[in-house]
């Protein structure tokens, strides 16, 4: 993923995760679990900057 798509995906997942966490207070506990998982994955996607680095091939 490049910087723009990683940023958009991370922000959308964080917003959806927060919305599910807030919605879980009015509904089922399952929404809280899904919200926390989506929030963690979204934060990881947003903050992972080493994904775009390509390692050089080591020759013998």
Image (cartoon, grey):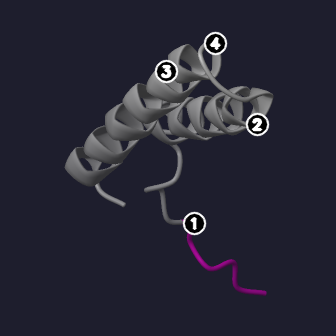
Q: Please provide the residue range marked out in magenta.
A: 55-60
Rendered image: mark on residue 30:
2
Pointer 4 residue? 25
Rendered image: mark on residue 55:
1
Structural distance between the alpha carbons of marks 4 and 2:
10 Å
In terms of secondary structure, what is the magenta stretch mainly?
loop
Q: Earlier in the sequence, mark 2 or mark 1?
A: 2
Structural distance between the alpha carbons of marks 1 and 3:
35 Å
Q: Element under label 3? A: helix
Mark 2 crowd level (few <14, some 14–19, many ≥20, 10 Å Cα): few
What residue is rendered at 37% in x and 61% in y? Answer: 1
Q: Earlier in the sequence, mark 1 or mark 3?
A: 3
In the image shown, does 58 or 15 lie closer to the viewer? Answer: 15
Q: What x and y, as percent, mark residue 20?
A: 53, 29
Q: Element under label 2? A: helix
Q: Depth-wise, is mark 1 or mark 3 nearer the camera? A: 3
Q: Earlier in the sequence, mark 4 or mark 3?
A: 3
Quadrant of the rendered image containing residue 27: top right
Report whether 12 appears left or right of 51.
left
Q: Depth-wise, is mark 4 or mark 1 nearer the camera? A: 4
Q: Farthest left residue? A: 4
Structural distance between the alpha carbons of marks 3 and 2:
14 Å
């Amino acid at each position: 993923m490049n910087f723009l798509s990683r940023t958009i995906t991370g922000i959308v997942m964080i917003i959806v995760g927060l919305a599910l966490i807030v919605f879980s207070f009015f509904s089922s506990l399952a929404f809280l679990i899904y919200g926390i998982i989506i929030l963690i994955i979204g934060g990881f996607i947003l903050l992972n900057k080493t994904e775009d680095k390509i390692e050089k091939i080591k020759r013998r």
